[in-house]
Amino acid sequence: MRAHEAGALHGEGYRGPTWLQTPVDVNALVPSLWAGSVNRGSDGVLAVGGMSVTELAQDFGTPAYIIDEDDFRSRARDFKETYAEVFDGLSGGADVFYAGKAFLCTEVARWVHDEGLHLDVCTGGELAVARRAGVPGERIGLHGNNKSVAEIRDALDYGVSRIVIDSFDEIERVAAVATELGVVAPVLIRVTVGVEAHTHEFIATAHEDQKFGLSLSGGHAFEAARRILDKPESLRLLGLHSHIGSQIFDTAGFEVSARRIIGLHTRIARDLGVELPELDLGGGFGIAYTTEHDPLPPKHLAAGMAEIIERECRAEQVAVPRISVEPGRAIAGPTTFTLYEVGTVKPVDLDGGAQRVYVSVDGGMSDNVRTALYDANYSCTLAGRASTADPVLARVVGRHCESGDIIVKDEFLPADVGAGDLIAVPGTGAYCRSLSSQYNHTPRPPVVAVRDGVARTIVRRETIDDLLALDV
């Protein structure tokens, strides 16, 4: 058991992480943390898509997730075009499946489809959103480690392009539903390759103790392929799937993973007589949440992955299968910031005579649980005005009854930050709305899309009536 979040952040002499430097200008924005259209106007007010945050706060209230639609579309398009171009000479291109778990609503599903991407869903609810948005079945893949019969039936009935098999039980479950419907289900096998990658590090052993996938070293993945190929009347094995982690900033982990997955691909061709046409390399590509992060652009990621796959396939003397990847955070994350209003400001004395300012806002762990859940780091800025005050070490916290209700653990804000000020936290487009809750019976914020000076609600704010609606 790890220590309580609040206690862990109060070590003796703590002055913030080493990567956090006192800013020369507390009003300056770090471009890599923000959506493309975000800027600070001559009046010092933050703007996105041609609209100021003061306008957005007045029209939509706070807290609110503010998404730059053009930035989202541009990132989606960049992934699609880059991977198609880089893999064109190797495997006739590549398919990009947007990972809906990062953030999904009807309008975002439409954007994904408009930009020519496929969509990865992992529940019946996400599938329902895709269907409502008009995403055709052939552009949808179904994931999940415990899919229900109803979810499998809905997916096959809608004609999804693939179902990712996660266990021996699912082989029988999917086959039974396919037989019932009189179809042949297209499937991939999720393989646990014994590689775990996060940020700049990866570990290549002892990471098969998890709920996802079928073990490579234990022979379960190969046995799954054999069982699926024994059911040609109900299952069609398209290929293998591997996902090695999240917030990945280089391709080192993919190198080990690719060697192992191509080895299994080759063994299936040699021993079972079938050269599988597809290979999914998963997602997990990182973004910049703070100045400590330096993610690779899609072009460099794609080029590195293509080089690795081509080399491993050449070594095994097999053709390069059709490649697919599943970015979610890398598309959605930087497109959005959360806009809050400051309520209480409280200076707290630290050991050694230092001081930290606690800045309480009108949201919290109900709209961004990642800091408490994953010990994640975020940045922020004073958004509604510029300041000439000196920077002070601050912690942005929420309004919930938890000591660990922290949004931004460490950041420098101007010393004159006070009640009524607007604070913007960038990089909240992925896993913030998706993981949001109604903790303390707090209505969830809206999602507001901004484009060309026009803002519109794409997910409305919850109300007290919504909170009470399910009570019987």
Image (spheres, rainbow, N blue to C red):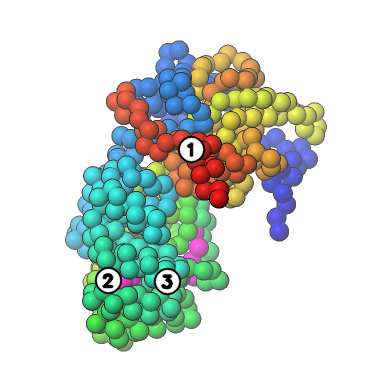
Give residue 171's quadrant in the image.
Answer: bottom left
| Residue 444 in sight | no
Label the magenta part by its dominant secondary structure: strand
Number of other residues with Cα within 10 Å of mark 2, as a class: few under 14, some 14 to 19, many 20 or more: many
Q: CA distance from mark 3 to mark 1?
A: 35 Å
Mark 3 neighbour class, 10 Å CA radius: few under 14, some 14 to 19, many 20 or more? many
Q: How many marks?
A: 3
Mark 2 and mark 3 lie on one chain; the one further toward the N terminus is 3
Instruction: Find numbered disc 3 in the image and state the secondary structure of the residue it sits on.
Output: loop
Residue 331 at x, y = what percent?
37, 45
Does 309 appear in magenta? Answer: no
Query: In screen coordinates, is 209 left or right of 294?
Result: right
Q: In the rendered image, which quarter contains the N terminus?
A: bottom right
Residue wearing tag 1: 462
Residue 36 vertical position relative to residue 73 in the rendered view, above or below: above
Task: Look at 74% across and 45% down and name the residue there.
Answer: 7
- Contact check, label 2 and label 3, Cβ < 8 Å: no
Image spot of residue 60 (x, y percent) = 44, 26
Identify residue type, mark 1: Glu
Residue 176 visible to the viewer: yes
Seen in the picture, residue 457 relative to 430 is either above or below; the reply is above
Earlier-in-chain disc, 3 versus 1 = 3
> Three-letter amino acid code at disc 2?
Pro
The three-letter code of the residue at mark 3 reads Asp
Q: Which image quarter: residue 121? A: bottom left
Work out how far the residue at label 1 is from the one at label 2, CA to CA, in angstroms.
38 Å
Query: In the image, is 386 to the left or to the right of 31?
Result: right
At mark 2, the secondary structure is: strand
Name, please, the residue furthest toward the front.
472
The residue lying at 45 percent from left, 67 percent from top is 145
Q: Which residues are magenta?
A: 187-197
